């Protein structure tokens, strides 16, 4: 874990990878937006899963601002970037909404926007 | 008569396909994604807000003005639900045949009675619920604009009312919590559940 005066180094694993500096008080989605990176989002409340990402390395994330975040999510490394604050350097695969919805369904947890009658 | 080359061939009498769906698919709408978004928004209007606002308004006891405004928002959310459902089926989708499964599709959290159920906590919850609705409906507008006029028209009507609801709750919360005046810019609705956009009622425009 490495912290400097500006916070933590967060690597966002986008198609073209970007790294941004995120203060421990800021949500990662907001910091990315302020750096010109517009990640998927909808409710901005840590509920709908649209902003989901997944940790690629072990790391610590504060998801206490999320309205619905389960221990199973944390165990599987899923994060909700709209409401995630870094507590360590992070390496995150973004655009994981579909994967997180599938995961939630398998765990019988709420999975908004995943219903299909097909 | 306009040339029909852009309309996918749906054979006469074929009830397995819909021209009304194929034409919007041809114009670039991801119909399956749209159906999922409409179901999520229907769940939010019906389960996350209409149902839970029923409880919230009961607990705004002693604040008859707030209760009435909460009631307007509640009934207008019900009007939205009634608008969305037919469109889901027109597009070839259907509602989950299981209420808890439907509830869990909502893209906005359930507006459950806050603890403690103070007026400020309730108004804050109402405000954030409306904000989630705005974000959800503008996504549908973005997905359908210029491609699916029927869904776009519906979504923009609902969005109009959600934006007004946000303005109401900003005004009330600023007054109640901060002692500040942040006008909504609105004066009144008609009868409860007026829903001027989603029910085609007259706007307040004296």
Image (cartoon, helix red, strand yellow):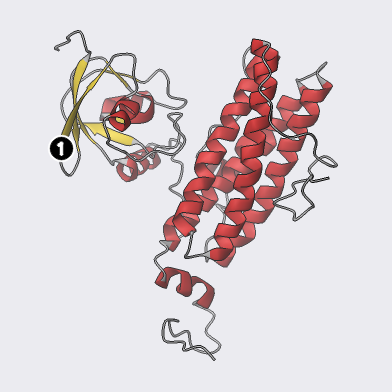
Q: Residue at x 42, y 29 (%)?
A: A46
How far across and down, in percent of the image, does residue B98 sit?
Answer: 57, 48
Residue reaching furthest to the front: B206
Whether residue B118 can be seen here: no
Left or right, B33 with reference to A38: right
Q: Which residue is mark 1?
A: A17
Left or right, B200 with reference to B20: right
Q: Which quadrant of the rendered structure holds the N terminus of chain A?
A: top left
Left or right, A6 with reference to B206: left
How far across and down, in percent of the image, does residue B103 sit?
Answer: 56, 40
Quadrant of residue B126 in the image?
top right
Q: Chain of mark 1?
A: A
How far across and down, in percent of the image, does residue B5 sit?
Answer: 41, 86
Whether residue B83 can be seen here: yes
Q: Which quadrant of the rendered structure holds the C terminus of chain A?
A: bottom left
Q: Residue at x 53, y 52 (%)?
A: B38
- The vertical placement of B115 against B131, above or below, is above
Q: Residue at x 45, y 32 (%)?
A: A47
- The vertical placement of B74 against A98, above or below, is above
- The vertical placement of B140 against B59, above or below, is below
- The vertical placement of A108 against A79, above or below, is below
How far across and down, in percent of the image, does residue B114 sit?
Answer: 62, 18
Quadrant of residue A111 in the image?
top left
């Amino acid at each position: 874990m490495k912290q400097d005066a500006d916070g933590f180094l967060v690597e966002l694993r986008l198609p073209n990878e970007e790294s941004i500096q995120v203060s421990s008080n800021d949500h990662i989605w907001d910091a990315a937006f302020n750096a010109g990176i517009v990640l998927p989002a909808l409710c901005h409340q840590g509920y709908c899963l649209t902003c989901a990402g997944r940790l690629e390395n072990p790391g610590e994330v504060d998801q206490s601002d999320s309205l619905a975040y389960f221990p199973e999510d944390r165990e599987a490394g899923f994060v909700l970037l709209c409401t995630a604050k870094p507590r360590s350097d992070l390496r995150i695969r973004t655009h994981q909404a579909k994967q997180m919805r599938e995961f939630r369904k398998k765990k019988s947890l709420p999975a908004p926007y995943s219903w299909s009658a097909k | 008569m306009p040339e029909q080359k852009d309309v996918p061939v749906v054979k006469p009498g074929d009830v397995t396909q819909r021209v009304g769906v194929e034409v919007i698919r041809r114009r670039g709408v991801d119909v399956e994604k749209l159906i999922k978004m409409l179901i999520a928004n229907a769940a939010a209007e019906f389960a996350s807000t209409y149902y839970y606002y029923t409880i919230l308004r009961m607990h705004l006891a002693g604040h008859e003005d707030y209760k009435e405004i909460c009631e307007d928002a509640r009934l207008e959310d019900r009007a939205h639900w009634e608008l969305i459902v037919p469109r889901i089926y027109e597009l070839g989708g259907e509602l989950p045949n299981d209420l808890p499964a439907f509830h869990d599709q909502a893209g906005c959290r359930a507006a459950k009675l806050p603890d403690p159920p103070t007026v400020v906590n309730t108004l804050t919850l109402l405000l954030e619920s409306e904000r989630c609705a705005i974000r959800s409906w503008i996504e549908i507008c973005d997905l359908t604009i210029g491609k699916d006029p029927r869904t776009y028209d519906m979504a923009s009507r609902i969005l109009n009312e959600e934006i007004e609801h946000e303005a109401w709750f900003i005004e009330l919360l600023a007054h109640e919590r901060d002692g500040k005046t942040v006008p909504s810019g609105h004066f009144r609705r008609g009868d409860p559940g007026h829903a001027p956009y989603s029910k085609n009622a007259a706007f307040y425009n004296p």
